[in-house]
Image (tube, rainbow, N blue to C red):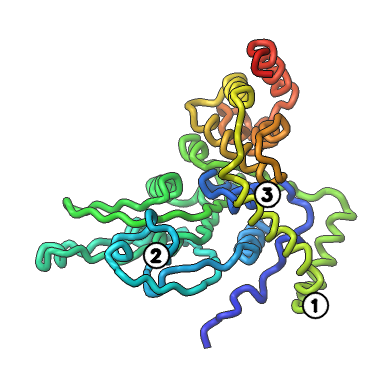
Amino acid sequence: MPHIHQFDDIYPFSAIVGQEQMKKGLLLNAINPKIGGVLIKGEKGTAKSTAARALARLLPNREVVDGCIFGCDPADRKGLCLECQNRTDLKSKTTKMRVVELPISATEDKVVGSLDIEHALKKGEKKFEPGILAQAHRNILYVDEVNLLNDHIVDVLLDAAAMGMNFIEREGVSYVHPASFILIGTMNPEEGELRPQLLDRFGLCVDIEGITDADTRVDVIKRRQAFEENQVGFLEEWAEPEQQIRERITRAQELLPSVSISDEMLFIIAQICIDMGVDGHRADITMMKTASTLAAYHGRNCVVEADVREAATLVLPHRMRRRPFSEQRMDIAKMDQSIQKTQHAHPHNH
């Protein structure tokens, strides 16, 4: 029998002790994948992969076109792959959200898929062998130890994540397919950093806190033990908190399109980015998307200053110009000054 109950042995998201920043980063990307993924930094054995799988279990089942290799959404006419666009009858079926893992040894062909050039020349039609990005469409793409991957492959992944599309070109033959996924990358900073150009491309970055409080550590042990001794009972015990998060994600997704952000908030975002010394404009745009998603997460349809502040702690630390690792923290006092500066410069917006 195939392993159908893929989630029965998965630890519940809501039962993960602490790690609030990591959970927030994951939930925000689940609500709005356009944020551009989350990079989780931390040592081994810190619930990184547990959290990714637990997130998949939280997300609702989805409708897919039956027989489509990309699992297109039958309701999204604009986002269909070329094959589905040409089909007259789209039958749909329901599937669970999956976690697609990218192995460190993956070659570019394995990631983007490959085109059969000979077939294209002989038959005049494109024959595409799907890769990992095709499997990841509308799922979670989990990349462990992203800092150990070949830079070029990380580039390709981040390109696809940003565009929601995968472009393949080989010897003048090109092919495109939808590749919209929730990107979760992890790395252990002790094994070397990611180049700043690549770091900047991850929407959010969170540091895993080592838990130094004995009570909390005991909680971690006890919950883990309870889970291992009686999984069914443990999952039942956490069913209610899981359902609450599930409903919160759905509500936030429904609210997100109507969230508005005032010019005052945009000025605050721009000023914080200038004062924190981040390069380029990706930080400003990601901060705007993250603040809007936070507003939806908190059940509001307009962005307030608290959303911008919270967004800054997730969007900026990994984008600040290089300093020793220990100093990659948000300077809260400096952020306050940026906000005050904006309020003096643009009093009419206040």
Q: Residue at x 52, y 33 (%)?
A: 285
Which residue occupies the foreground of this view, 86 or 147?
A: 86
Q: As displayed, is residue 266 above or below residue 47?
A: above
Horizontal side, residue 22 vs residue 142: left or right:
right
Q: CA distance from mark 1 to mark 2?
A: 36 Å
Q: Quadrant of residue 328?
A: top right
Residue 159 screen position, x and y as percent: 40, 45
Q: As displayed, is residue 5 above or below residue 115?
A: below
Q: Residues within 10 Å of mark 1 (few under 14, many from 20)?
A: few
Query: Which label's residue is closer to the chain start, 1 or 3?
Result: 3
Which residue occupies the foreground of this view, 280 or 151?
A: 280
Q: As displayed, is residue 284 above or below residue 207?
A: above
Residue 70's disc is 2
Q: Would you name the residue on which mark 1 appears?
A: 233
State yes or no: discs 1 and 2 in contact (Cβ < 8 Å). Answer: no
Q: Nearer the viewer, mark 1 or mark 3?
A: 1
What's under tag 3, amino acid-wise? Answer: Met
The residue most toward the bottom is 1
The residue most toward the left is 122
What's under tag 1, amino acid-wise? Answer: Gly
Query: Which label's residue is closer to the chain start, 1 or 2?
Result: 2
Q: Residue at x 50, y 58 (%)?
A: 141
Which residue occupies the foreground of this view, 291 or 231?
A: 291
The residue most toward the top is 345
Q: In this view of the protein, can residue 276 be seen by the observer?
A: no
Which residue occupies the foreground of this view, 109 or 316?
A: 316
Q: Would you name the residue on which mark 3 appears?
A: 22
